[in-house]
Amino acid sequence: MTKKLFLIAALPILFAACTNPWMANLVDPIIQEKYDGPAFYVKNIEEWTNVLEVEIPAFYNNEGARKFYIIITGSFTTISGFQTPTFNVDGGYPLPGIDVTIIGNNHKITLPNTNDVGSLLYIGDEQRVTIKDLQLNRASITNHDLTNNIALVSVSGTDARFTMTGSSILSGNKNNQYGGGVYVDSEGVFTMSGGSITDNKGFGGGVYVASGGTFYMSGGATISGNDGDGGLGGGVYVDGGGTFTMTGGNISGNENTSEGGGVFVDSDNTTRGVFTMTGGNIYNNTANNGGGVFVDGDFSMSGNAKIFGNNAVAGGMASGGGVCVYNGGFFTMSGSRAEIYGNTSAKDGGGVFVYGGKFLMQNGIISGNTAEQDGGGVYVTNDTSYIAVFTMTGGTITGDGSSNTNIATTGSGNALFVQNGTVTIPPGSTTVLPNQFRDTTIP
């Protein structure tokens, strides 16, 4: 994907190099006092287009402005048709260092219900865009039947940055490829501290983090009701080399008919996706494998992080209601408040299914999970190419029949079932041999 991708490129809302004089009457003097850069009221497509094509280039070129504010005062629908943006300066190079904040006042900008439209926001080299209380969406849910190969927001280019705050909403987009809501390309950064990404489809129905991309999620941010469309990751997909840090927020109610209802963390031959979760919740997500999280890269869970209420349903392995650690994937659980609880699977590993991966449990609690067959809490087995490793040095896996116990409904191992692999548990470093299980709480 080319790195010459620039701000807001759907429609013919095209930035164009311009030497028009400053049209002062279009800058409201009252709201101007509140901001440290030119500020504009926008209530319709005509004013939106004028600000982007005329006013911002004029301030940039003639006044040296780099920071801008757009205040949306009415909802409107854009016109269809994606064109390559042309907001260039100084001989055709991308406009560098631009910083735009769009304050939506809970108004909505809608892309039409048609094929062949591009991203509503396209953020490129050295461009920074923040949205607050703004809704960006497709015209209706029927767009899920349309052919579209691009996210609602694309963050692509060196030091491209997108921030989502307040009550902003991204919804209703289907991408037949990567990222229904947001696509974060190499060297792009997406920070989400508020708002919601909902009702989108694609590989990474809510957010796709490509190799070299970075995603930060915190506060009250929500990624919910998205669909992986049979690919990978209903809520979030983290590709090999991508990075996702979650300190707060919720990933919930997402689904995928393949792997990773909530989150899919991938790897390739040379790089690994990395997901660090120190807070927030991953809950009520559904997939065939790894209802909450599917890990083929690296995942670390600590602090007050919770994975609960997820479900691995019939189809595929139907295992790992909360977490599936697969083929060399590495999952670390630490911190006394970290919990994996109340998850279910149609087959094995209600809480955790380790299938040729590695799981290190240093602290935390795995409780109240249910497997229809074996391993209510944890199930461990080798893959054809990888030896599964489960090492427990602290924490608790329940299996004592109490109200929060793990349960293997028709099989064995309420707490732990080991088909094969290398498993050590406390007290000491007890080795659990193949085809053995623990029905009682560990340790």
Image: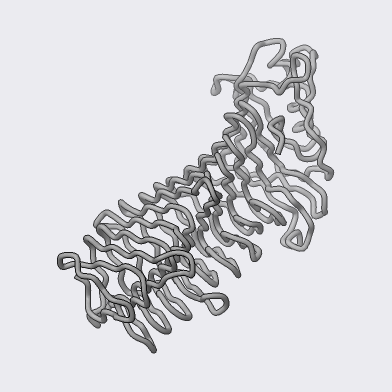
**Residue 142, position as x, y percentages in the image:** 76, 62
Q: Residue furthest left?
A: 428
In the picture, residue 38 is in which quadrant?
top right
**Residue 309 as seen in the image, left or right of residue 139:** left
Q: Nearer the viewer, residue 259 or 77?
A: 259
Q: Residue at x 75, y 14 (%)?
A: 90
**Residue 406, position as x, y percentages in the image:** 31, 77
As displayed, is residue 311 above or below residue 42?
A: below
Q: Nearer the viewer, residue 412 or 418?
A: 418
Quarter in which the N terminus is drawn: top right
**Residue 421 as seen in the image, left or right of residue 182:** left
As displayed, is residue 346 above or below residue 195?
A: below
Q: Nearer the viewer, residue 225 or 381?
A: 381
As displayed, is residue 414 above or below residue 236?
A: below
In the picture, residue 382 is in which quadrant?
bottom left
In the picture, residue 23 is in which quadrant?
top right
As displayed, is residue 177 above or below residue 142?
A: above
**Residue 193 as seen in the image, left or right of residue 90:** left
**Residue 220, position as x, y percentages in the image:** 45, 49
Quarter in which the C terminus is drawn: bottom left
Q: Residue at x 73, y 61 (%)?
A: 144
